[in-house]
Image: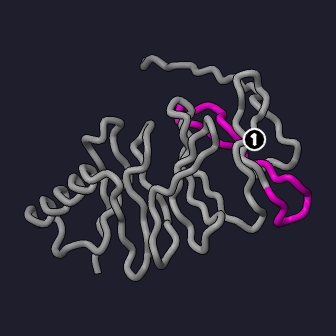
Amino acid sequence: MPHRRRFTQTTREVARSDGQVLQWLIGTDRELAGRIRQLGPADGSDSVLELREPDGQWRIVKTIGGRNLWWVQRIDLRAARLWAVSNIGRDKAVLVEVNLADGSERVLAEHPVVDIGSTIFPPLQGAPLAYSVEPDRPRIEYLDADFGAAIATAVARARSDGLLDRDPVITRPVTMTPDMQRMVLRAVSE
């Protein structure tokens, strides 16, 4: 008879919404790191990004206008950084990095014609490696040149091994190992 494991499950309340929480933010440590909370009951009300302090209190880091885009991509409390796609103060969405200690923000990537789309991060922690844009055909722009070169090398090898019959329009990492030495890539051709 095979050995069977018995798993126990426990539940604990970490935080409670007052009905105004739009989004809970889980950090790279897989713990509750922050929340986006709407300031008023009406649709379109401003909201705030709040970080959870060690004592359980909430600290406001940023106010977000009700008609603005603020799409949190990753929050890394150890690095004291947050990455988001935002259109605050702009006519297009850009990729920003926020210093959680002082709230300062810097633009990491923008496109002159279209919004920044999705972002690609290393599996566990760290800054974005790449982002997508679609000015005509979808494409990936690499913030990390070595990562971009690794993708290009994999595509070239797939072509030479006959796994791809033509150059892809876009090659997107689907998943990768924590050390980033193995990846599953999705290549799309015309």
Q: Secondary structure at mark 1?
A: strand
Quadrant housing the C terminus: bottom left
Q: How is the image coloured?
A: one colour
| Residue at the disc numbered 1 | 60
Q: Is residue 26 magenta?
A: yes
Q: Nearer the viewer, residue 130 or 109?
A: 109
Q: Magenta residues, as a range?
A: 24-46
Left or right of 152, for residue 34: right
Q: Position of residue 73 (x, y in %)?
A: 55, 51
The amino acid type found where label 1 is placed reads Ile
For the question of whether residue 85 can be seen, the reply is yes
Q: Position of residue 17 (x, y in %)?
A: 83, 41
Splitting the image into 4 quarters, where does residue 167 fall? bottom left
Q: Is residue 151 magenta?
A: no
Residue at 75%, 21% (x, y): give it. 55
Left or right of 74, for residue 33: right
